Image (cartoon, grey):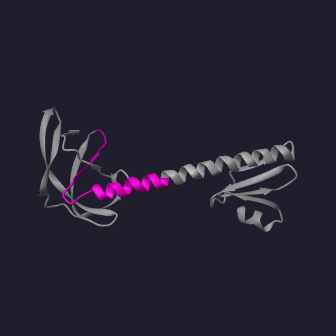
Amino acid sequence: MRNYMRTQNLETIEAADLEIFITGEHTAMGFAGRSRKSFFNYRFNSRERMMEYINTIIEKRTETLKIKEEMKKEQAAKKAEMIKNIKVGDIFYRSWGYEQTNVDFYQVVRKTKSSVVVREVAQNRTETGWAQGRCSAVKDSFLQSSKEELKRINAYGCTGLSKWDGQELHWSAYH
């Protein structure tokens, strides 16, 4: 639709990442970013009301893009800090399961510019009740069956993993 609108000889307003086509005396259609689907296609009571609406949309979109850009910079700074703080030997964990809580621990064995290579390590487990208990990682005790896994570093740690703070974690089993 957007490409078709471009082929028509229509009045076009471009601002921020918006492309707005004036399709008639009181009608307009707007596209945002690279979207091929319009986010509005309205008929207005007057041209003044239409232009007022378009100006409001442009202001809101400009503000939204500014906020997104600030968030991007903030996330990049957090990611850079996380990259700096993760060291070979650090322990991460993944907690998962359905009707039970499984916990796997991983140790960083190598670090690249924006990712880490981890291997699963053994864990100490103690039962605190029927089919449940507490567990902690055993550093440098790699499981024989474990393979190296590449994990990207993001602003919050490694993709799919959380940094372990040394405290015991809860586990449970279904059977």
Residue drawn 82% across the image and 43% down it: 49
Q: Is residue 86 above or below residue 124?
A: below
- Which percent across, then down, holds residue 159? 34, 55
Does residue 94 belong to the magenta stretch?
Answer: yes
- Which percent across, then down, holds residue 144? 13, 61
Q: Is residue 147 above or below residue 72?
A: below
Residue drawn 64% across the image and 59% down it: 35
Residue 33, image quadrant: bottom right
Residue 52, image quadrant: top right
User: For this view, does 161 lie left or right of residue 145?
Assistant: right
- Which percent across, then down, holds residue 169? 21, 40
Viewer-closest of 75 and 173: 75
Q: Is residue 71 above or below residue 101?
A: below
Q: Quadrant of the N terminus?
A: bottom right
Does residue 1 belong to the magenta stretch?
Answer: no
User: For this view, does 90 lie left or right of residue 44?
Assistant: left
Residue drawn 14% across the image and 32% down it: 128
Q: Residue furthest top?
A: 129
Q: Which residues are magenta?
A: 72-99
Residue drawn 78% across the image and 60% down it: 12
User: For this view, does 121 lie left or right of residue 15?
Assistant: left
Viewer-closest of 131 and 42: 42
Q: Is residue 43 visible?
A: no
Q: Is residue 136 above or below residue 17?
A: above
- Which percent across, then down, holds residue 88? 21, 60
User: For this view, does 38 lie left or right of residue 121?
Assistant: right
Q: Is residue 9 visible?
A: yes
Viewer-closest of 130 and 137: 137
Residue 158, image quadrant: bottom left
